[in-house]
Image (cartoon, rainbow, N blue to C red):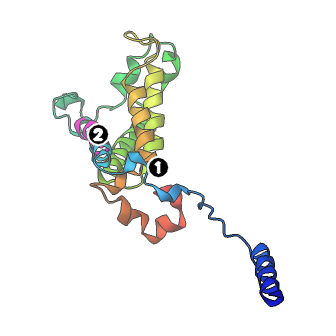
Amino acid sequence: MATTQERNQRNHRLHDAAPTAVTVPAPRTHGDTIPATTAGPVRYVWAAARIAIGWVFLWAFLDKLFGWGLATPAAKAWTNGASPTAGFLKGTADHTLGGLFTTLAGQPWVDWLFMTGLAAIGTALILGVGMRIAATTAGLLLLMMWAAELPLTTNPFMDEHIVYAIALIGLALTGAGTTLGLGTQWAATPLVRRYPILK
């Protein structure tokens, strides 16, 4: 009887001393779930937006370069010696910042910077490479064009330049270059691995 009682007391002490297993859920990390903006069919919507905006920029470059007659007549093509910036910038003379922008109209360095920007941004967006730089430079270009037209005639502050700029931020943040584009391969190159800003 005493032996049984001692055994029970010893087992009771061991049970009290044994640590109780507590299941604590592991904290969720950002990588546990795929953001809704980059998963499923919505990634194709972002890819389509990327390609469409890229084409807007690339077409503007090609039309101003060759004067294919849709927005730029052949006589005003850059290849025929006309300035691709003069028409737009000279047309801002009566606007709030017209004095600043009209002084830039027709300057060779402005023409080269503008045309190089259109071609590079359009190409980068269509291919899905260099999205961060393409979105940033395109956004700056669009904001300058928006500022050149102030005050707006159809809205107090919002127009397509701002809408495009917002969409470009979304394209860069969602990694839209990896769907229907070369973004994944571009990110794997030694240059981009060394300088992630080039993604």
Find residue 59 and report its horizontal and vertical position in percent.
24, 39
Find residue 146 and report its horizontal and vertical position in percent.
44, 23
Q: Secondary structure at mark 1?
A: helix
Residue in view at x 35 percent, y 57 percent: 178
2 or 1: tag closer to the N-terminus:
2
Q: Is residue 156 above or below residue 41?
A: above
* Magenta stretch holds residue 62: yes
The residues colored magenta run: 49-63
Q: Is residue 113 above or below residue 71?
A: below
Look at the image and tell me whether residue 113 can be seen. Answer: no
Q: Which residue is mark 2?
A: 61
Q: Amino acid at mark 1?
A: Arg
Q: CA distance from mark 2 to mark 1?
A: 20 Å
How many residues crowd around disc 1 within 10 Å: few (fewer than 14), some, or many (20 or more)? many
Residue in view at x 43 percent, y 41 percent: 170
Q: Is residue 65 left or right of residue 155?
A: left
Query: Who is closer to the viewer here, 11 or 153?
Result: 11
Q: Secondary structure at mark 2?
A: helix
Find residue 150 and report its horizontal and vertical position in percent.
46, 15
How many residues crowd around disc 2 within 10 Å: few (fewer than 14), some, or many (20 or more)? many
Q: Which residue is mark 1?
A: 132
* Magenta stretch holds residue 61: yes
Q: Amino acid at mark 2?
A: Phe
Look at the image and tell me whether residue 5 can be seen. Answer: yes
